[in-house]
Image (cartoon, helix red, strand yellow):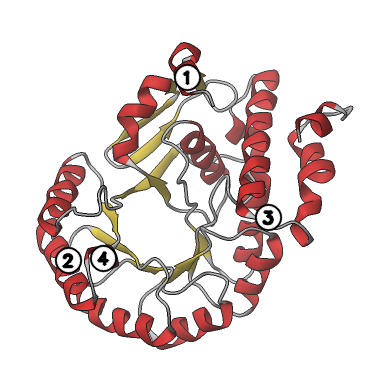
Amino acid sequence: LGQMLCSLDDPSPETYQRNVSGWYDKGHQSIDFSSACGAIEVALWDIAGKQAGKPVCELLGPVPTRTIPLYANLEQLTPDESVSELVERCLAVKDMGFNALKIYPMDYGPLDIATECVRSVRQAIGDDADLLLDIWALDTTQEALAAAEAFAEFQPFWFEEPIAGERISEMATIRRKIDMPVVTGERQVGIDHFRNLVQLEAADILNPDIVGAGGIQNLIEICALAATSRIRISPHCWNSTLVATAAMSHAIAAIPNAFLGEYFPHYAPFCAELGELDISIKDGTAIIGHEPGLGVRMNEAALAPHEI
């Protein structure tokens, strides 16, 4: 990829997408390759912003707001984490100002235990907070429907990845049969996949990963596809609370149907050692500053011990 990039007369994000990374969409689809392409594409946007003396969001289009709502991802920290420990973390994150929290109930046991997990979290955070459930791909449609029925009384804000995202027709069946928003897209790449999701009406919300999907331009194209069916976008952001969070926030600021970003509070202390962001995370929102590019200042000395 680096050699191909260096051979371009115009190493802009648009040229890179057209001549280097775009060809794989109908061929070599893998999230590893897409993520590598996405990382380079995001870096090119940072360079373009610095060259223009503007934040990336201003290069993408009109910026109606620089304040981006976030949800806190509370993935299970260890295989033996208890529900009570999860509840404590949820309360701590809510105290930080996050009013939308995502948990993975199926990580804590079979459906009956998972249901008690959701009940405990809902009781702890109250009815005023949004509770997002990531089911992490059950084996069958029947299992997904049973989980949806069990969790419905706790009024989930969304029901994410009830089955594997590539099983689009089954995802569409689940969406038709349950009364809560279905979310999918974090583990998939390629515009064709998201086009099929939209055409089959398989989801209410798409959550392509900001880097895994191939970068900012691919995210914008996916958002445009979704907008034709009034589907909203909540970009997935598993990569970091540093560069990826910056890229995600700048993209959301310029995309009309993108409404909510992902944030991992437990990544923040480590990422803070590696660099700084011209984005303040406060009361469950990301507030974008005015530095050019992505506004990321890396600490190269701190990065050096982690080189591979």
Give the image quarter of residue 161. bottom left
Identity of the amino acid at label 1? Leu
Q: Are marks 2 and 4 in contact (CB under 8 Å)?
A: yes
Amino acid type at image mark 2: Cys
User: Which residue position holds label 4?
Assistant: 105
Lower position in the chain sequence, tag 3 or tag 2: 2
The numbered mark, 1 or 2, whose residue comes first in the sequence reads 2
From this view, report whether residue 159 is shown above or below residue 220.
below
Q: Which residue is denoted by mark 2 in the rendering? A: 117
Q: Which residue is mark 3?
A: 221
Label 1 close to label 4 by CB (< 8 Å): no
Nearest the eye: 158 or 289: 158
Disc 2 crowd, CA 10 A, few/some/many (<14, 14-19, 20+): many
Q: CA distance from mark 3 to mark 2?
A: 37 Å
Q: Is residue 186 above or below residue 285?
A: below
Determine the secondary structure under disc 4: helix
Residue 157 location in percent, x, y?
Answer: 32, 66
Q: Earlier in the sequence, mark 2 or mark 4?
A: 4
* Mark 3: amino acid: Glu
Relative to 86, say whether 144 is above or below: below
Q: What distance separates the C-alpha of mark 3 from that of mark 1? A: 33 Å
Q: Is residue 90 left or right of residue 160?
A: left
Residue 21: % across, % down: 76, 45
Q: To which residue does mark 1 refer?
A: 303
Q: Are marks 1 and 2 in contact (CB under 8 Å)?
A: no
> Residue at horizontal 45%, vertical 67%?
183
Q: Is residue 131 visible?
A: yes
**Upstream in sequence: badge 4 or badge 3:** 4
